[in-house]
Amino acid sequence: MVRNVIGAVLAVVGAAAAVWSPFREWYDGRHGRDYRVGDLFAGITDVKAELWLSILLPFAVAALLTLIGVVLRSRPLVALAGVIVLGFTILWMVRVGQAEGGLTVGADGSGIGDGAASALGGGALLLLAAAIMSGRPRRRRDRLEHRPVPSGPYEQPPHAQEPTRTMDTPTWDERRPPRDRDGPV
């Protein structure tokens, strides 16, 4: 129970960080909402994207998967949301690195911004939340309902039959070595 609560809180914080990240600077003052999702697959251009066709779209889908996963206590859904966020962020880093000739991090605000860091942190929090959550309890089926029913009134199923004992088979007491009554045990 406690693990699910902690995992749910981390998942919601991670999803919020991922959804908030496109509204912050990602690279050289350019916000994440300015990068089109199609540019991640075809190559980064200077064309600005519409809001819902930007990198916000996969992060919003990941946030929706996170909320469904938290409500259903589904670790795989929360982990999938984390993989989506990290996957699109890393794909963005690869494409920007190709377009710019490399990625930089500068103290003066140039290079990778806090929006990309927020997306990476949000994706990592989602994966951590999926690892912490205990998930849903599994249903255990009663094993007796799958056993064959005996056909006759005196017939027993094979698992209930006792092994036959012959006269040559010693009992437990006969197999134990005799104890010396006067000596140490």
Image (cartoon, rainbow, N blue to C red):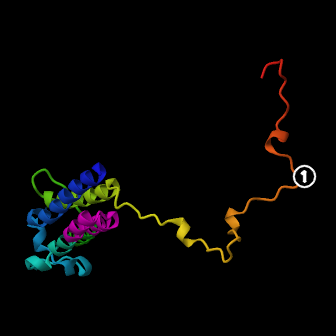
Please say whether residue 67 is one of the residues in the magenta stretch: yes
Residue 95 seen in this snapshot: yes
Residue at the spot x=72%, y=63% of the render? 161
Residue 117 seen in this snapshot: no
Q: Secondary structure at mark 1?
A: loop
Residue at the spot x=23%, y=78% of the render? 43
Asked where in the image residue 102 lies, by quadrant, the reply is: bottom left
State which region is magenta: 62-87
Left or right: residue 79 versus residue 140 is left
Please say whether residue 118 is one of the residues in the magenta stretch: no
Quadrant holding the C terminus:
top right
Residue extending farthest to the right is 168
Across and down, in percent, residue 93 comes to 24, 66
Mark 1 belongs to which amino acid? Answer: Met
Left or right: residue 67 versus residue 180 is left
On the image, numbered disc 1 is attached to which residue?
Answer: 167
Residue at the spot x=68%, y=76% of the render? 152
Asked where in the image residue 178 lies, by quadrant, the reply is: top right
Q: Closer to the camera, 104 or 181?
A: 181
Across and down, in percent, residue 95 comes to 25, 72
Across and down, in percent, residue 137 comes to 37, 60
Q: Closer to the camera, 155 or 7?
A: 155
Left or right: residue 185 versus residue 80 is right
- Residue 11 drawn above or below residue 154: above
